[in-house]
Amino acid sequence: MSILEVSNIQKSFDSETILKGISFSMEEGESVSIIGSSGSGKTTLLRCLNFLETPDEGTISVRGEQIFDAHGPVLKPEEIRKRRLHFGMVFQQFNLFPQYTALENVMLAPKITTDSPDISQIEKNGKELLDQMGLSDRMNNYPHQLSGGQQQRVAIARALALKPDILCFDEPTSALDPELTGEVLKVIRGLAEQKTTMIIVTHEMTFARDVSDKVIFMDGGVIVEQGESHAVIDDPKEERTRQFLASYSGV
Amino acid sequence: MFLTVTLSLLEGFLGTIKLFALTLLFSLPLGLILSFGSMEKLGVIKYPIRFLIWVIRGTPLMLQLLIIYYGPGIFFGVNVWGGSANGRFAAALVAFVINYSCYFSEIFRGGIQSIPVGQYEAGQVLGMTKRQIFFKVVLLQVIKRIVPPMSNEIITLVKDTSLARVIAVYEIIWNGQAFIKSSGIIWPLFYTGAFYLIFSGLLTLLFGYIEKKLSYFR
Ligand SMILES: Nc1ncnc2c1ncn2[C@@H]1O[C@H](COP(=O)(O)OP(=O)(O)OP(=O)(O)O)[C@@H](O)[C@H]1O
Ligand SMILES: [Mg+2]
C-alpha cells in the first residue's frame, strides 16, 4: 500500500487557480523530488499536505487512511493537528524559534504536545538527532549564533523529532550561501540512505537526480512529467520538461 | 521647613504612585484584549475597537478626565463618582485606564504583527495549538520587541498622573502647589520634579535590565 496517495488536489487563491489537479503517490522509504519553475505551485502543494492551506478539491491519504477530503466535513483544529503530524515540514527560511537553543527547539514540540512527556527520553532523542545532523557541539547555541546551514540542520532535527511518516522540504538550501548548501544536502542524502520517506522541493537538479528515487516536474499547477529520477532528468519525455532542464544545464 | 515639605510631597507622591500602579495593573491586560480585538477578522469587533482607539488617542487626556468625571452628571444627571476624594480618584483611574489601554493596545498590536508568520507556521506544523504557539513561541519575542516603546509609554504615564489635578485628585503637584497658598513659597512645587526624576530614573534602570535580560536572543 502506498504511504501517500494524493488525488486531484486543486487550489485557487482569489480567482487564480494555482494547483489544477495534482495526483501522485509514493511508497514507504521513497524520496521524491519536486522540480519546476518559480510560481508553478510547488510550495502551495507542500502547504496543502501540511494543512497550512486547504485544497478546494481532492483527497489525501496516508497508508490508505483518508486524512483529507475537500468534500468531507470541516475538520476541528484538534483533528487537523493530529492529522498534520503525518507530515513534517522544513521551511526555506528555517523558522527556528529564536529564544530557544538548538536542543530546546528540537525538544519543544514533543515536550508540550504529548500528554505525559518523558522529558529524559525526549532529550535523549533530541541529542541523538542533533548528533546525526553533525551538531553535537552546537546543541546549546541559540539560532542567531548558528550559520544558515546549521540552522537548517536544526530545523530538520526538529521536524524529525516528531517522527513524521513523510518529511517535506521546501527548497531547504535556497536561503543559504552556496558554500553552505553542501552540508545540508549531505544530511538529506543521509536521510535518504536510511530510507526516510521524503518530498523535497528543490532547484538542485543533480541532487534530485542522484538522491531521490522519483522526480516530479510541475509547471503551471499541473504535473507535466513524473518518473524514476534519472529518467526524468537525463531523458525527459515532455518538451516542457526539456525546456525547463535546459535552463539549468551549464549553470 | 524642608522636612515638612519633603514629608508632604512624599505623601502626595504616594497618591501619584497609587494612580500609576493601578493604571498599569488594569490597562496592561485590557490593552492586550483590545489589541486582539483590533486584529480580529470580524468587522463588528475590529472597527468599533479601532474607532475607540482613534478617539482616545486623538483627544487630550485632560479632556477625557473632565468628560469622565463631569460627563455622567451633565448628560445623565447622575453623579456616579460621589463628591469624595475617593470618588475623584476612581474617576481619574477610569480615565487613565481607558487612555493607556488604547496606547498599550497599539504597542501590543505592533509587536504581535511584527512576528513573522513563519513562526506561527513552524508551530502549527509541529502540532502546537494556537495557545501554545502564542505563549511558548510568540509571546517572549513580542515582549522583547515592545520593551523599548513600553518603557517610553510607562515613563510618560508617571508624568501624566499630574493631569489628575484637574479633577482635584491629590497627588504630588497638588501638594507642592498647596505651599504657595499656605506658606507663600514656590520652591516645593519645583522640588516635586526631583521625585519624578528619581522615580523615572528607577524605571529606566528596570527597563534597561529587562532589555539586557532579553538580549540573549535575536
Ligand atoms: N496565500 C496566497 N495568496 C495569493 N496567491 C498566492 C498565495 N500563495 C501563493 N500564491 C501564488 O501562487 C503561485 C504559486 O506559488 P508557489 O509558492 O506555490 O510557487 P512555487 O512553485 O513554490 O514557486 P517558487 O519556486 O518561487 O518557490 C504564485 O503565483 C503565488 O503568487
Ligand atoms: Mg516555493
Image: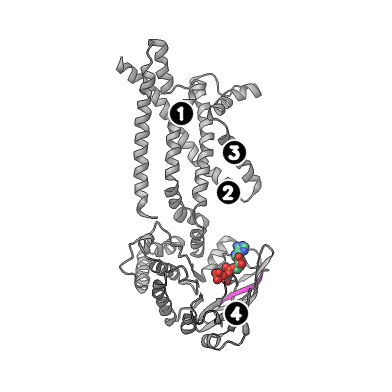
Q: Amino acid at mark 3?
A: Trp
What residue is rendered at 43% in x and 23% in y? B171
**Dot 1: what SS?**
helix
Disc 2 marks a residue whose amino acid type is Met
**Residue B131 picture location, percent across and down:** 50, 54
Type of amino acid under label 1: Thr
Q: Is residue A230 left or right of residue B218?
A: right
**On screen, B121 above or below A208?**
above
Cα distance, mark 3 to mark 1? 21 Å
Q: Chain of mark 4?
A: A
Which dot marks residue B39? 2
Q: What residue does disc 1 label?
A: B161
* Helix, strand or loop: magenta stretch: strand
Q: Position of residue B112 (x, y in %)?
A: 50, 50
Which quadrant of the figure has residue A103? bottom left
Labels 2 and 4 in the same subunit:
no
Residue nearest the observer in this picture, A97 or B124: A97
Amino acid marked by disc 4: Phe
In this picture, is A29 found above or below A146? below
Q: Is residue A24 left or right of residue B7?
A: right
Query: Looking at this view, is A147 or B8 the one in front?
Result: A147
Give the alpha-carbon distance from disc 2 to disc 3, as whole Å: 14 Å
What colouring does the structure picture have? Answer: one colour
Mark 3 or 4: in front is 3
> For mark 3, what is the residue?
B54
Q: How many marks?
A: 4
Q: Secondary structure at mark 3?
A: helix
Residue A24 marker: 4
